[in-house]
Amino acid sequence: MEAVLYVLHGSRVKLACEQAISFIETCMEEIPVAIQEYCFLELADPTIEEAYARCVERGAATIIVIPVLLLTAVHAKEDIPNELARVSKQFPNVEMRYSRPIGVHGNMVEILMERLSETGKLIDKDSMVLLIGRGSSDPDVKRDLTTIAGFLKERAGIGRVDTCYLTAAKPGLEEALEIVKQSKYKKIYVVPYLLFTGILMNTIQKTIRKSLADQDKEFILCQYLGYHPLINSVLRQRVIEAGGGQDLVSRHA
């Protein structure tokens, strides 16, 4: 029997964890696999080890692990796989299949389009977008977000889409704001490429307010991505991919 284990990042902010759990419970309802569990990589419970063991206790012979992470980085490539390698040794008779994270996907561009649209502001020739990623020392993060920025530029017909990061990658948010201040664009849509609210969103708001002093430009802070239904669809695809194709879902339907 197959199981699906969703690995969420985790946060010190209780609301962020509650939002993540609520979203994953919705995903579970739409993926017809009998055994499904969630866990957190860090900062919250249950842990990967606890949830993995729970899958086995419920009768799983195969566990499909889905990293619920926006971009391909160290968490997805090292931290989660390393912990899974350690935990899976306790259950040598259980097969473990590891999925790729959300990554570059057309649905993510559609969510960005929605975040721009819900501001009620007109995107015109004086408009540009600044995408803010969490950041990582892993170059694949910059690769992925730059690719998404290119897709958004084409999809929305925007003259310019820049990227920046809150930590561990360049340019940082303050540097990026200084760069866009020097641009010809008068209207800057700032979109946090984040799944959940919390400390980072507060940092963005404070930094933008500080940057607004003596400026003739309009900075429009959009809503963060959130746990959007279109992400649900991506996770379902990841389950199917890791399970070897449509058969995994269809045989449980």
Image (spheres, helix red, strand yellow):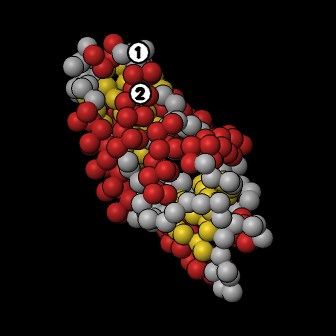
Residue at the location (30% across, 38% down)? 27
Residue 197 drawn at (x, y percent): 43, 62
Up the image or down, 138 lies above or below 125; here it is above
Question: Number of marks in the image?
Answer: 2
| Residue furthest out toward the front | 125
Res. 60 image quadrant: top left
Describe the element under mark 2 as helix, strand or loop.
helix
Mark sitting on residue 34:
none
Mark sitting on residue 245:
1
> Which amino acid type is shown beneath numbered disc 2?
Gln
Residue at the location (60% across, 74% down)? 218
Residue at the location (36% across, 16% down)? 246
Q: As drawn, is 61 to the left or to the right of 66? A: left
Q: Residues within 10 Å of mark 1 (few under 14, many from 20)?
A: few
Q: Is residue 6 visible?
A: yes
Q: From mark 1 to mark 2, how far is it between C-alphas?
A: 9 Å
Q: Observer-nearest residue: 149 or 28? A: 149
Residue at the location (30% across, 20% down)? 249
Up the image or down, 232 lies above or below 114; here it is above
Q: Quadrant of the C terminus?
A: top left
Residue 37 drawn at (x, y percent): 30, 36
Mark sitting on residue 237:
2
> Which amino acid type is shown beneath numbered disc 1?
Gly
Q: Observer-nearest residue: 178 or 169? A: 178
Name which of mark 1 and mark 2 comes first in the sequence: 2
| Residue furthest out toward the bottom | 214
Up the image or down, 124 lies above or below 94; here it is below
Q: Observer-nearest residue: 236 or 136? A: 236
Q: Quadrant of the N terminus?
A: top left
